Image: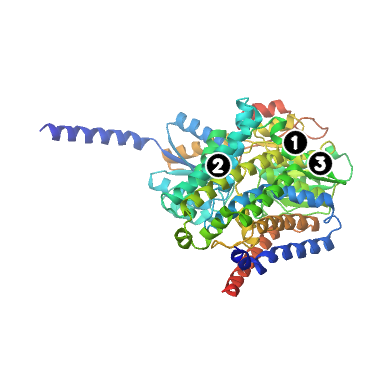
Amino acid sequence: MKFSTTLILSSLALAIGSAFAADAPIIGLITKTETNPFFVKMKEGAKAEAEKAGAKLMSAAGKIDGDTAGQITALENMTSAGAKTIMITSAGDAIIPTVKKIQAKGVQVIALDSPFDGADALYATDNYKAGVLIGQYAKAAMAGKPAKIAMLDLFPGHPVGAQRHNGFMSGFGLKANDAKSNELSTAPEIVCANDTNGDRAKGQTAMENCLQKDPDINVVYTINEPAAAGAYNALKKAGKEKGVLILSIDGGCQGIKDTEAGIITATSQQYPLKMASMGVAAGVEYAKTGKKATGYVDTGVTLIAKTAIAGVDSKDTKVGMDLCWGKK
Amino acid sequence: MSTISKRNIPWGVLGPWIALAITCLFFATQSSRFLSGGNLSLVLQQVMVVGVIAIGQSLIILTAGIDLSCGMVMALGGVVMTKFAVDYGMNPYLAILCGLGVTTVAGLLNGLLVTRMKLPPFIVTLGTLNIAFAITQIYSGAQTITDLPPAMTFLGNTFNIGSTEVSLGTVTMLILYALAWFVLRETAPGRHLYAVGNNPEAARLSGISVDRVLLYVYALAGLFYGIAALLSVARTGVGDPNAGTTENLDAITAVVLGGTSLFGGRGIILGSLVGAVIVGVFRNGLTLMGVASVYQTLITGILVILAVAADQMSRKGAR
């Protein structure tokens, strides 16, 4: 008697509990890596928004940049666990078939930061615009002096790498591919282009080799702030850090500190937290009303520079520090 | 005593050097800047981290093992030594020792898992790769450690030979290679290592404690990864938790290009130095020529296959 009562009561409790849980929409967030401060901030934003909206957040990540296999596994696992919306920063187009598969099961898939074909919606920085802003700043800062440009890129074929690179060229006044292209444009003013993987040490090596090729490089575009720090190291070792402009993109707190310290001349700041909170809001909306998010929302980019230049709209490093992501 | 050295002579030894010479000659014709002292010194600095990791990797590969965790262990060592010095205000030399200690312990862990648990080195080090990475990221909070005391980066300092700047780190790498070469060639432990790699059963029967040799090899490799960490810290000037992501494959590439067989028991340690330098020379030379980076990767892949094929052919020849 006692046993069956307990059984009935506990199954009732379980049923009630899961009924409550069933009300809370389950939203997944899959980032490229777990620990890059950019994605840490994104997860923070997602968690905060999820708590506010009463949603349950599941998170996962690939192991390293480019780990599409890890992301595919996470997509499948989250779908089986009941996630109705999954936000993902794509590590590569290899995830597209899996995305299609789970979309057929009714899951809304939102791309954050990195675009891919077939996502229901995209909340991302306009990476092309981010490049254009620093390109414009560099052009104005050069004030007509002939430029010898080094491009320190990510690696071939990545849309974000291509957009930032081509955007920079466009902003600088050089003919370049548009935002839809995955190919890196070239120009005679660009005397050297090398890949860095967005890594500090590789950025240093790339800059050193570029300086060997042409010691008179005076403008350096870098894919992100760790690569910029590496490039600065190389310039400093060659005694050239004073006369060279280093441009970058990201707006992380370490990067803004580097901008304040004169290591980076100007950087375009982007807002991962906004991407995630918008994604969560879209997930909650889908769960409540069945209406999917669509289209592309630009989550904004701000040019941060220590020295303002006439004709180019920028904000100073104090603003940058207030809005930066990562540990302050 | 000389039976081992006789088997290792032709292809395996000369091949990498010839390849390096041809490569340098080629780039010298393509760019007047290539053969300058400054440029070559730069290339050596660029390869010194992978070069030192490759010493540890060579020792392990000579025993027919492999170590996928080397890059991550190096990153862990770098983060530990810099964080100890900067965050806890520890004496920099003591902090460096702590970093070396951590990487040696990591190597020892690999060795214990391989010898006591009899697990395949590939699997073991695949696991420790992830563990080391995770610990590094968690401990550092994914933040780089900056504002290091000058004592930590002293290996980045240079001195002049003529008008060429040579980095202390490069000299360190060369000295370590010379030491490793001497020990492997002229001492009993070195011969035991080759014996274990060649034929562990025969080695055991001739009285060599195979487990003890392997344990020492993995722990010693860990120490080398720690030294590589110090070189990495000296080069970049920071403790970087994201360092070392591709160093494992880069080190294995260097070892293979240098003519060491992945099957163990054959190979000259200096070959790994040549292998590492070849990769650096290509990266530098192709940049000087203005060739896109993606071709460096293509060429490295082709070279690796050529090197392994050459090793296979010389194996057949020796039989």
Badge nearest the viewer, 1 or 3? 3
Q: Quadrant of residue A246?
A: top right
Q: Which mark is residue B104?
A: 2
Q: Which chain's residue wears label 3?
A: B
Percent across and percent down for residue A106 are 42, 49
Quarter of the image that includes the C terminus of chain B: bottom right
Percent across and percent down for residue B59 are 58, 54
The first of marks 2 and 3 along the sequence is 2
Q: Which residue is mark 1?
A: A264
Other residues around mark 2 within 10 Å, as few (<14) / some (14–19) / many (≥20)? many
Could one spot residue B292 in this view of the protein? no
Percent across and percent down for residue A76 are 43, 50
Instruction: Report whether mark 1 lies on the same chain as mark 3.
Output: no
Badge nearest the viewer, 2 or 1? 2
Q: Quadrant of residue B283?
A: bottom right
Q: Is residue A87 left or right of residue B294?
A: left
Q: CA distance from mark 1 to mark 3?
A: 29 Å
Q: CA distance from mark 2 to mark 3?
A: 30 Å
Q: Which chain's residue wears label 1?
A: A
Decide which of A226, B82 is in the foreground and name it.
B82
Classify A100 as above or below B154. Answer: below
Decide which of A77, A133 is in the foreground and name it.
A77
**Residue type at the position of mark 3:** Phe
Q: Which residue is mark 3?
A: B159
**Residue type at the position of mark 1:** Ile
Percent across and percent down for residue B171 are 74, 46
Q: Is residue A296 left or right of residue B149?
A: left
Task: Classify mark 2: helix, strand or loop.
Answer: helix
**Residue type at the position of mark 2:** Thr
